Image (tube, rainbow, N blue to C red):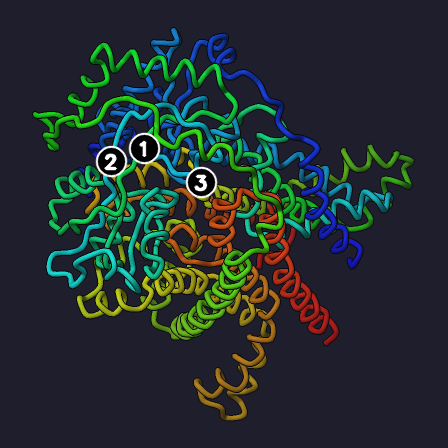
């Protein structure tokens, strides 16, 4: 067994080393695009009106999609828009899954180090919105307040730089971030002014915008570094679109009079200022990972994971005891309730349960409870509830299997000795049942610990979330993933050993 | 609630196919089935390797199983998302990334199920085969495996339920499966999360509960057929 563990640890480390031997070969994307006959563009699928899924036709449409089509037409190939998330778009481009990024991509020096930008095709103001009547009046007052943003968005990055004291909460996409804003889980949200306008119309709710923009950003199309031929073609296409008025027409189609934005175009396609300057900077090294703040992030994530696991374990155990009590009562509807509870908790994906708790549950709670949640790190509390309530079903089943394993004679003997129903339970049945159900309970605990990583989907800063955050900033994927895997693995191993020990001890009896 | 289903049922069922990959509920079931189909033979091979005489083979496979049991699936998914395109050298869509992650992860878990099935067979079976002069490989493929797989069929069905649930994690890397469809609708409608996530949860429940019930039913039948006492 020990050898197996050593081999497993070696495998994690070896994997890291092996990957450097398989670097992807550079190739000319433009040539590939031409021979393939399609240009694969990464576009957003949930950011109106840039790239979104039209519910009627279920096709990707929007300003970005139109630019993708126009560029493809200029190259003489068919356009193939592909949905990418804001967070994954640059990794997807660099992995070669897409040829061209047309995905609400603002220029930042960090990104310019990872990809090359075309000329600008859009200019946007990043603003901060707050609820009406909020006491936040300017950007400085965001310090120590909770602000939501789409994961990996420029808004998030500008916010971290301009207001270092703000607690930034990131979400899968802008609508999720807005939902958290609207449900009062955060004090403010950072997004583009157009998106703010859009969300105001869509949701029918109203909010105030802080006048001073957090940034004015220029958007470009993204290509992989070193793809000179493709970049040249894209820039030629954009310039031609500007000259022929096609760029203006696309703007008017999505933002002009007659749309809900009623904007006029105030920018032109042109090279992005500073565009070349940042490209000169060199790549970081592995040692970047040891620099502040990354070790702190990772450690804090680890602690949050343990916290989350511990608290939801206690919750799950308490509910499971309650369920067991209900099941042992001889009231049929109560037994029914317990079986239904167990089946629901075990037959719905945990991710869905977590999302349900986070997005749907608070609106079902009374106002007082909602208010309390807003002020108490709601994503952590709700993730704890989701994990606890779900695992309670598993715990209850494990305890039941323990109770079933107790011979009937035990209860009969207790009765014969004059024990009442409750006393029999407390002194005879439950102590034995817990002992018998320890091995499955240990397995459930392992499940709970590992599944706590799912809380990343709602923005809990646990180990997996921090790992991804560090990866997004340093691009040291292998090293940071290996480290996180090792951390998960060592705690899991501890739990597995303990489970094996308990099982051996029980077998001896 | 009904109007959401009425307006979006195609999106919920098949995603934005034919304008994109097959998604929605069909995408979820497709991903789960294909993963199980490939993971099953892998797991049988792994279970056999763990009972083999070669120490290296045994140790290697054992450590893979331990590694998978000790790692969250989400971690495996992120690894796969990074490694699969890198190792293959050509771009791989999120569906296949998730497929690889599920196959690797589930092979390890399924191999435990299959191994338990093999080890639960009475020793007399393999001893009798040896006494009849059957070579080891023939014993394995014609005597042991058919019985072991038959006996562990309910456990395999239960594992299929796990796989269906696990496909939802594909949402995190952008697989167009059922949860993704619901999230897209949620992004479109914005203010009706309770209804959308209820539809999502109930649909998953109906599917998974049906398979889980089928597993229990099959288990009772097998116990009866094999002359084992029902619990």
> Closer to us: mark 1 or mark 2?
2
**Residue identifier under label 3:** A110
Q: Point out the tag, 1 or 2, that comes first from the N-terminus.
A: 1
> Is any atom of residue A378 visible in this view?
yes
Q: What residue appears at the point 29 percent right and 60 percent down from the top-left corner?
A: A146
Query: Disc 1, disc 2: CB below 8 Å?
Result: yes
**Residue identifier under label 2:** A124
> Closer to us: mark 1 or mark 3?
3
Disc 3 element? helix
Q: What residue appears at the point 72 percent right and 41 percent down from the top-left corner?
A: B46
Horizontal and vertical percent position of residue A322: 40, 74
**Residue identifier under label 1:** A104
Q: In front here: A309 or A206?
A: A206
Horizontal and vertical percent position of residue B149: 66, 40
Tell me, yes or no, whether dots 3 and 2 are on the same chain. Answer: yes
Which chain hosts label 1? Answer: A
Query: Disc 3, disc 2: CB below 8 Å?
Result: no
Disc 2 element? strand
Quarter of the picture containing the N terminus of chain A is bottom right
Q: Residue A302 got which mark?
A: none
Label 3, label 2: how far apart the Cα atoms are: 18 Å
Vertical position of residue A247 compared to residue B202: above or below: above
Which chain hosts label 3? Answer: A
Disc 1 element? loop
Quarter of the picture containing the C terminus of chain A is bottom right
């Amino acid at each position: 067994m020990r050898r197996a563990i050593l081999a497993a640890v070696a495998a994690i480390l070896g994997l890291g080393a092996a990957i450097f031997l398989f670097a992807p070969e550079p190739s000319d994307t433009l040539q590939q695009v031409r021979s393939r006959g399609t240009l694969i563009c990464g576009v957003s699928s949930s950011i109106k009106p840039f790239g979104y899924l039209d519910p009627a036709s279920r096709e990707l449409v929007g300003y970005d999609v139109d630019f993708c089509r126009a560029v493809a037409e200029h190259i003489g190939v068919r356009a193939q828009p592909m949905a990418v998330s804001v967070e994954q778009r640059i990794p997807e481009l660099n992995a070669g899954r897409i040829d061209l990024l047309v995905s609400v991509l603002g220029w930042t020096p960090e990104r310019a180090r990872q990809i090359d930008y075309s000329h600008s095709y859009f200019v946007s103001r990043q603003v901060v919105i707050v609820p009406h009547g909020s006491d936040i009046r300017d950007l400085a007052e965001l310090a120590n307040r909770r602000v939501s943003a789409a994961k990996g968005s420029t808004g998030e990055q500008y916010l971290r730089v301009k207001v270092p004291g703000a607690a930034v909460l990131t979400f899968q996409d802008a609508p999720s971030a807005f939902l958290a804003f609207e449900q009062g889980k955060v004090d403010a949200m950072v997004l583009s002014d157009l998106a703010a306008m859009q969300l105001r119309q869509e949701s029918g709710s109203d909010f105030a915008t802080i006048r001073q923009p957090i940034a004015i950003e220029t958007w470009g199309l993204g290509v992989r570094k070193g793809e000179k031929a493709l970049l040249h073609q894209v820039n030629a296409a954009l310039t031609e679109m500007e000259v022929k008025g096609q760029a203006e027409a696309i703007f008017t189609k999505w933002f002009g009079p007659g749309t809900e934005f009623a904007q006029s175009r105030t920018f032109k396609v042109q090279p992005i200022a500073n565009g070349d300057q940042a490209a000169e900077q060199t790549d970081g090294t592995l040692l970047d990972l040891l620099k502040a703040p990354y070790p702190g992030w990772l450690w804090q994530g680890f602690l949050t994971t343990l916290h989350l696991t511990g608290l939801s374990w206690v919750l799950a155990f308490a509910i499971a005891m309650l369920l067991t009590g209900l099941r042992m009562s001889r009231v049929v509807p109560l037994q029914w309730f317990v079986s239904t509870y167990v089946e629901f908790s075990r037959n719905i994906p945990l991710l869905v349960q977590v999302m349900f708790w986070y997005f749907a549950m608070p609106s079902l709670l009374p106002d007082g409870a909602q208010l309390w949640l807003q002020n108490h790190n709601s994503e952590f509390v709700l993730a704890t509830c989701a994990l606890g309530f779900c695992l309670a079903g598993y715990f209850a089943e494990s305890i039941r299997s323990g109770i079933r394993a107790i011979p009937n004679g035990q209860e009969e003997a207790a009765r014969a000795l004059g024990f009442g129903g409750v006393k029999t339970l407390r002194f005879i049945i439950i102590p034995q049942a817990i002992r018998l159900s320890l091995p499955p309970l240990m397995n459930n605990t392992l499940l709970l610990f590992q599944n706590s990583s799912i809380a990343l989907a709602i923005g809990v800063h646990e180990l997996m979330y921090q790992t991804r955050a560090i990866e997004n900033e340093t691009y040291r994927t292998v090293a940071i993933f290996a480290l996180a895997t090792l951390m998960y693995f060592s705690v899991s191993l501890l739990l597995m050993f303990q489970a094996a020990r308990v099982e051996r001890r029980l077998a001896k009896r | 609630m009904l109007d959401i289903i009425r307006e979006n049922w195609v999106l919920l069922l098949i995603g934005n196919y034919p304008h994109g990959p097959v998604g929605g509920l069909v995408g979820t079931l497709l991903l789960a089935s294909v993963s199980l189909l490939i993971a099953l033979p892998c797991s049988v091979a792994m279970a056999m390797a763990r009972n083999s005489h070669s120490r290296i083979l045994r140790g290697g496979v054992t450590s893979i199983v331990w590694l998978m049991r000790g790692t969250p699936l989400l971690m495996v998914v992120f690894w796969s998302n990074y490694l699969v395109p890198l190792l293959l050298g050509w771009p791989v869509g999120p569906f296949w990334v998730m497929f690889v992650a599920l196959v690797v992860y589930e092979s390890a878990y399924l191999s435990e199920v299959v191994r338990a099935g093999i080890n639960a067979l009475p020793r007399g079976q393999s001893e009798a085969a040896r006494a009849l002069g059957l070579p080891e490989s023939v014993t394995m493929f014609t005597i042991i495996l058919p019985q072991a797989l038959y006996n562990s069929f309910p456990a395999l069905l239960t594992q299929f339920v796990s796989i269906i649930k696990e496909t939802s994690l594909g949402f995190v890397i952008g697989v167009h499966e059922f949860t993704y469809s619901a999230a897209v609708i949620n992004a479109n409608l914005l203010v009706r999360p309770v209804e959308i996530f209820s539809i999502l949860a109930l649909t998953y429940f109906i599917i998974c509960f049906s398979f889980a019930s089928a597993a229990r039913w099959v288990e009772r039948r097998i116990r009866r057929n094999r002359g084992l006492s029902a619990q």
